[in-house]
Image (tube, rainbow, N blue to C red):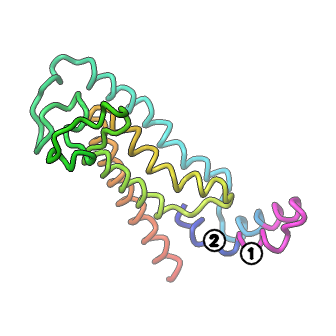
Amino acid sequence: MGKMRLLAPKIQAARERHKDDPAKQQAAMMEVYKQEGISPAAQAGGCLPLLIQIPVFFSLYKVILVTIEMRQAPFFGWIRDLSVTDPTNVFTLFGMLPYNPELISPTLHLGIWPLLLGVTMFFQQKLNPPPPDPVQAKMFQFMPIIFTFMMGRFPAGLVIYWTWNNLLTMAQQWHIQRNVTLTKKA
């Protein structure tokens, strides 16, 4: 993916040169891949870690919700129970306003951890190369917002796990991209 980010201008130029002929466009892109020693099939391998994480994510969700030992187990800071949603809420100014916005809509429960999840998703997307399709790029821009509100109702333990996973993935991506850039310069 780091090499793909460096190749993005060349691929975009190949698309622009042959925008009227999809066959020539595909051939030009394959030539760029061949010159740089990148296999387009290997890009699909970037989804493999996500596919491995899905059973882990689902299992963690079930363990947090079902396991009796997880109920009201103390954690760090304001999280007193990993099996319930984050008790803070941005719509009550984190407890300063005395009302329950969930009476209006259940989607109005948005704690600190879901907000952090949205921020880490946003920055993680900035580390990835932009998708070539403008519709897909627009959809990806809204995903952190959608997931922020969606994960606001999930157990805090799950949101904490996903946020830390995003932070570690960003550190890994930054390290790999830095090494690819240094290797390219040498």
SS at circle 1 = helix
Q: Look at the picture and state if 5 lies above or below 71.
A: below
Report x, y in % for residue 155.
28, 32
| Magenta: main secondary structure | helix
Please tell me which residue lies in front, 35 or 72.
72
Measuring 45% from the left and 77% from the top, which residue is drawn there? 182
Q: Amino acid at mark 1?
A: Ala
**Quarter where residue 20 is shown:** bottom right
Question: Where is residue 38 shown, x and y percent of the image?
Answer: 65, 62
- In the image, residue 69 lies at what x, y percent? 15, 20
Q: Determine whether 145 is above or below 35 in the image.
A: above
Badge 2 local density, few (<14 within 10 Å), some, or many (20+)? some
- Circle 2: residue type: Leu
Stretch of the chain drawn in magenta: 11-28
**What residue did someone put label 2 on?**
7
Q: Left or right of 116: which side holds 1?
A: right
